[in-house]
Amino acid sequence: MKSKYYRSWHLANDETEFKVTELEFAMMRVLEAFSRWVAAADEMVGLSELKHGEHVILHVIRMQNRPKSGATIARLLNRDDLPNIQYSLRKLESSGFIQKNKEAGTKNYTYSITELGERMTNEYSKLRSEILIRRFRSLADFDARAEDATELLSVITGIYEESARTSVTLHRASE
């Protein structure tokens, strides 16, 4: 894109800044669209009481059909707000979608999916395949493109994480 189109934008002073800014806005739009999709699908399958984060946590707990601790869930989702995750876990437990399990001989707890949770996540998965995945399959070379995008997003995640760590060690000069 010609610099005359982004010259006056504070987030895009050159071609690279423009590309990064466009990518950031695209990621935000994808996240919002994904959240709307999840809410609409949840409404159809009877999970409308779940907030987006609770929905994601429910599927993470079901992943690989193994119980997960709150810390494992946080690590898988790259979140550091464990109290919020614990709140979501309590909500999911009180709704009957998951159950809390005490690990033998420790003070640690894990969470596993209940029969109701399995039934609801199966309904979501079926609807997702029928509506969403069908559309992705219609895109040319989607599997390879998705793999490339996933790899790029993983690298970008690392760059943002390292930049956040670096920024914590720096001190802004007084003006």
Image: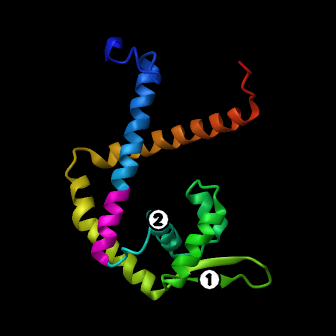
Q: Is residue 148 in sight in this rendering? A: no
Q: Residues within 10 Å of mark 2 (few under 14, many from 20)?
A: some
Magenta stretch prevailing secondary structure: helix
Q: Which residues are magenta?
A: 35-45
Counting residues from the start of the chain, the first of labels 2 and 1 encountered is 2
- Which residue is found at the position 48% from the left and 72% from the top? 58
Q: CA distance from mark 2 to mark 1?
A: 17 Å
Give SS at disc 2.
helix
Image location of residue 73, percent across then percent down: 59, 65
Residue designated by label 1: 100
Please indicate whether residue 103 sits to the left or right of residue 3 in the image: right
Q: Nearer the viewer, residue 106 or 38?
A: 38
Give SS at disc 1.
strand
Query: 75 above or below 88?
Result: above
Query: 79 above or below 13?
Result: below
Q: Nearer the viewer, residue 77 or 88?
A: 88
Image location of residue 136, percent across then percent down: 25, 53
Q: Is residue 40 a member of the stretch shown in magenta?
A: yes
- Which residue is found at the position 34% from the left and 65% from the top? 39
Q: Is residue 116 a member of the stretch shown in magenta?
A: no
Query: 124 above or below 8?
Result: below
Residue designated by label 2: 56
Rendering quarter of residue 12: top left
